[in-house]
Image: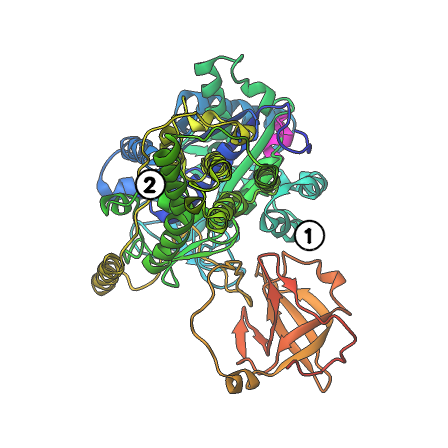
Amino acid sequence: MSHDEFPTENPAVVTCGLPYANGDLHIGHLRGYIGADAFSRALETIGQETAYVCGSDMHGTPVAVNADQQGVDPEEFALEWHEQYEETFPQFNVEFDNYGHTHDETNTELTQEIVRTLDEEGYIYEKEIQVAYDPEADQYLPDRYVEGTCPYCGAKARGDECDEGCQRHLEPGEVEDPTSTITGNSAEYRERTHKFFEVSEFADFLTDFLDGLEGTSNARNQPRQWIEDGLQDWCITRDMDWGIDYPGEDGDGDDLVLYVWVDAPIEYIASSKQYSERVGTDEFDWEQVWKGDGEIMHIIGRDIIQHHTIFWPAMLEGAGYNKPRGIAATGFITINGKGLSTSRNRAIWAKEYLDEGFHPDLLRYYLTTTGGLQQDVDFSWEAFQERVNGELVGTVGNFWYRSLLFAYRNYEGTPDADVSAAVRERIEGAIGDVRESVNDYDLRGIGQAATQLAQFGNEYIQRNEPWKLTDDEPEKAAQVIRDCVQIAKAVGVLLEPITPDKAQALWEQLGEDGAVADAHLEDALEAPPRTFEEPGELFGKIEDERVAELTEKLEERVEAASDDGDESDDGETENDDTGADEAEGMTDTDDLESLSDERISFDDFQDLDVRVGRIESADGIEGADDLARLEVDIGFETRQVVAGIKQLHDLDELPGEKCVLLANMEKAELFGVESNGMILAAGEEADLLTTHGDAAVGEKIR
């Protein structure tokens, strides 16, 4: 890989975390796949050779458990979901160059080859460990067959992850008070021989790897704490018969298969290989990417950062493969402020969204441009309506339609004039914004570059009023509309990664040949066809009555499921099968367009006791990935404050720094630590607020 600015001369692979083949897709899953698809398209738009690959995760205990419950074979169960995913993704314009699955021959052979290499290089060893066992069922209990308590934070844990608390990976034998999910009885621990991957040998490599890693800050910073705490070797075998066999077993490892997190990421390589075999290495060479100097980018859920930034690069390094250039981790999706819950039917399902008659590009736009990639997004039908009506209908669609319609009626297409220097410069600026956003892994920036260019177009046509110029100043009128048609084409090229269908529809209305997906950024400045047909409106307004109907339907469904089923939130909020968000002292928010209509009085503001503080000490809270305990001097006393900045700041550098603290915030307890106040920060990087001058510690902010 290189760290040259995109586009590079090297081929690239974009991947997204594999979906477990065990249930319906909802918008929490779609955020990652749509985001990765948009990023892949954007790379191609700027001229980067790119393949977007993925596949279904067929193995692991979640699949086996659900198959058991339905009384079917795990392979049959998983293949059914795999086929459904293959049908669903294209309906949201998620176009993989290859979509495989982890149980196919390619992935099986590559997985066993890589594990064999790790073994030969001395990175795998045997060890006697404690494994949960169900005496009544007379079987060992891997991963999701055992539930209990997390030894680090005390939250409920399922098998290999504390998915309702600190989100740590848990090794076999670590879950406290184990219970069998097969019989519901208490389990007991028994000794068992398993294979271990010596991740601890890669600590120095992983530190250097993270230093050079591109992507989102949470993916770069969160793993550092695990390295500092001391890496634990990973048990890479499980007591079950569903999965990929450990290579070269001599009979002593009956019923042992490889842990799902061994073969799952290797599917990225396998899917790339299958793509090369289909199109030929002259078209795309998978070995140049994975064994040479190609560019590898992963778009993943925040709950699987550890697997992709610790376990996976260590495997690649040990087996002699290329490592990821960038890892971008998405935030979670909530519904009306609450986490997604499949057991309580609190989700917007992929099929449900399509059945309601909405175009997939509307959801693509909402999910990719609402906040930063790593920011949590709260979905409501009202917020969805606001973004669609305000930006796609009111800004982009309005500009497209009014400018092309005027051009058609007055000139039967593109007027015979040159693009003005000012408009060319503005389009070039938007092109530069897209390039910068791609290199910053900023999907929102890509979409905003196009939307803001359309906004400029609206202001330009309104300011120049060509309808008043056609009789008295026809040349000037033609110049204005020529500029507007060029802006419209440019917006279509720039918006294609986010809304590919709508961009293609505009492309065709302009009379352009081929596909807008094949256009590069520079094509935004190429002259549109001289003539085109009468345009139609590309976006339709979502009415208030429709939103009220959808909101009521969702609330009724959630309430019915809550009355009939599990009252607890199951934490399913991401593109993997796990992922409850850890409680944080601060919530990231970056949606500058969404200002609250609710106003407070001056008296209410006066009730806020906001003070200048100075951080005296800063320490991470054990068991919490994001939380830090701060001692903050506010003049007349020192306050203990908990803040979600552990992964976003070097805590050793914070003592002595000034901050702004809300002093009369209600006390709260997070991970057993009392928080007496709240420090204020801006943006997803948690930029700590401070004062410009020499305001004294304890000074009240007015």
Q: Which residue is mark 2?
A: 538
In the displayed structure, would residue 665 be above or below residue 293? below
Q: Position of residue 91 (x, y in %)?
A: 31, 35
Task: Point out the residue furthest to the front here.
Answer: 472
Colour setting: rainbow
In magenta segment, residue 318: yes
Q: Is residue 142 left or right of residue 630?
A: left
Q: Residues within 10 Å of mark 2 (few under 14, many from 20)?
A: some
Q: Which amino acid, by three-letter code, is at mark 2? A: Leu
Task: Give the image location of residue 624, x and y in percent.
Answer: 57, 61
**Quadrant occupied by the N terminus:** top right
Residue 534 on the magenta span: no
The front one of 64 and 409 is 409
Question: Mark 1 — residue?
Answer: 228
Q: Secondary structure at mark 1?
A: helix
Q: Is residue 585 above or below residue 171?
A: below
Taking depth in this image into account, of 6 and 453 the one nearest to the observer is 453
- The reply to whether residue 20 is in sight is no
Q: Is residue 21 left or right of residue 669?
A: left
Instruction: Count the numbered circles shown.
Output: 2
Q: Dot 1 surroundings within 10 Å: few (below 14), some, or many (20 or more)?
A: few
Q: Residue at x 55, y 30 (%)?
A: 418
Q: Which residues are magenta?
A: 314-322
Q: Mainly helix, strand or loop, the magenta region?
A: helix
Find numbered disc 2 in the image and state the secondary structure of the residue it sits on. Answer: loop
How far apart, in angstroms, are the residues tagged by discs 2 and 1? Answer: 53 Å
